[in-house]
Image (spheres, rainbow, N blue to C red):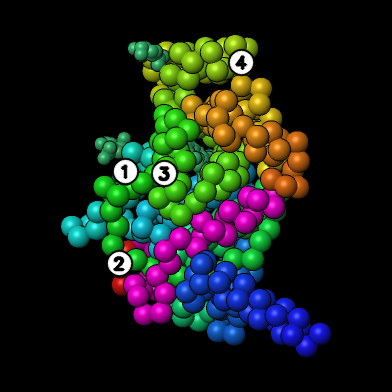
Amino acid sequence: MASSLTFLLLSSLVIFSLTSHAFSASLSPYFYYKVCPKALPTIKRVVQDAVRQERRMGASILRLHFHDCFVNGCDASILLDQTTTIDSEKTAFANNNSARGFEVIDKIKSEVDKVCGRSIVSCADILTVAARDSVVALGGPSWQVQLGRRDSTTASRTQANNDIPSPFMDLSSLINNFKNQGLNEKDLVALSGGHTLGFAQCFTFRNRIYNETNSIDSKFAKQRQSSCPRTGGDSNLAPLDQTPFFDTKYFNNLVAKKGLLHSDQELFSGGQTDNLVKIYSRNSWIFSKDFANSMIKMGNIKPLTGNQGQIRVNCRKLN
Ligand code: HEM
Ligand SMILES: *[C@@H]1O[C@H](CO)[C@@H](O)[C@H](O)[C@H]1NC(C)=O
Ligand SMILES: *[C@@H]1O[C@H](CO)[C@@H](O)[C@H](O)[C@H]1NC(C)=O
């Protein structure tokens, strides 16, 4: 009895320390609890206002966080403007004329610094929390965000070009790309479910709707062709799924060969991720749970902590 109790206690200690190390050295959900209890409610309020003004903004902020984390960790590097010493990520292929939401992050930062009375909340934490609050504002699941990230003093357009996945990738390249970030196939499928929100520009799916006749529903292809001509209209928008809120429509589409991007349809194309796509298409609870778990995992990629980096006063430039 005593020994099995000891075993239980020990094994839960081991699990606890393993998970806390595997995920993050010194992040904690309570990082700002004492020093600025108003920080998180303030982020939520500004995100809600922004989404009320324009629903798409929630999608744009979620994507901004993803593009931050995939380039040398979640360190707000994507927010830095170009200077003689900063190689801005804003003009990388995946971001140029595409990444949006920077003004909302600026607004959050200034409101948070105002309620805290000084600059103690990092831009990287703000972006991570704002992504969660965006998903919630659009009807998705919530989760507890680990906090204590610090902001980078560098950015890299080259690394952004190399590390952010392209919509023209096939399944094995997508799996590899996520693997390089410590994310597995389940994370790839669950996080791609972020495409239940937001829009894509014509040039990102043109080849798919005109050339990929074997893997696309022909009626859907025609529909999309009507607002995405063979030439011109490069920046015309189409929704990534047909509903403006967080649901499993994206996965239903994949099963019906109505994925908008080539990379979307790759997840249901006869490969090893087909089964998970089917599961998510039928069960929103499992999708929501896995999405939340994978968002936590993505948010914990290579954080700067302790006295690494800095807490930027202005998210767009170094102190
Ligand atoms: C799996 C690899 C991925 C690829 C290849 C990819 C690619 C793209 C592309 C090409 C667009 C359209 C951009 C434009 O036309 O301007 C887009 C939009 C978007 N992506 Fe992804 N994405 C991927 C994963 C993710 C992940 C992991 C998330 C978040 C969890 C995400 C969230 C979004 C959102 C919300 C939008 C809409 C943004 C808006 O309307 O402003 N994507 N993605
Ligand atoms: C980014 O877009 C701008 C405006 O369309 C364009 O002039 C510039 O060449 C692009 N930059 C890169 C690096 O592609
Ligand atoms: C379709 O594929 C052909 C051959 O690869 C290519 O030349 C053409 O530009 C593609 N069409 C569209 C609309 O992307």
Residue at 30 percent of width and 67 percent of height: 153
Q: Amino acid at mark 2?
A: Thr
Instruction: Answer above or below: position of 199 versus 38.
Output: above
Instruction: Find residue 52 and report its horizontal and vertical position in percent.
Output: 65, 49
How far separated are the C-alphas under marks 1 and 2? 19 Å
- Mark toward the start of the polypeptide (3 vs 4): 3
Q: Do the residues bearing badges 3 and 1 touch, measured as CB atoms within 8 Å?
A: no
In the picture, the disc for residue 177 is: 3
Q: Secondary structure at mark 4?
A: loop
Instruction: Identify the image quadrant of the N terminus.
Output: bottom right
Of badges 3 and 1, nearer the viewer stands 3
**Tag shown at residue 153:** 2
Work out whether 179 lies above or below 317. above
Q: Which residue is mark 4?
A: 217
The amino acid type of the residue labelled 4 equals Asp
First along the sequence among labels 3 and 2: 2
Callouts 1 and 2 close, C-beta under 8 Å:
no
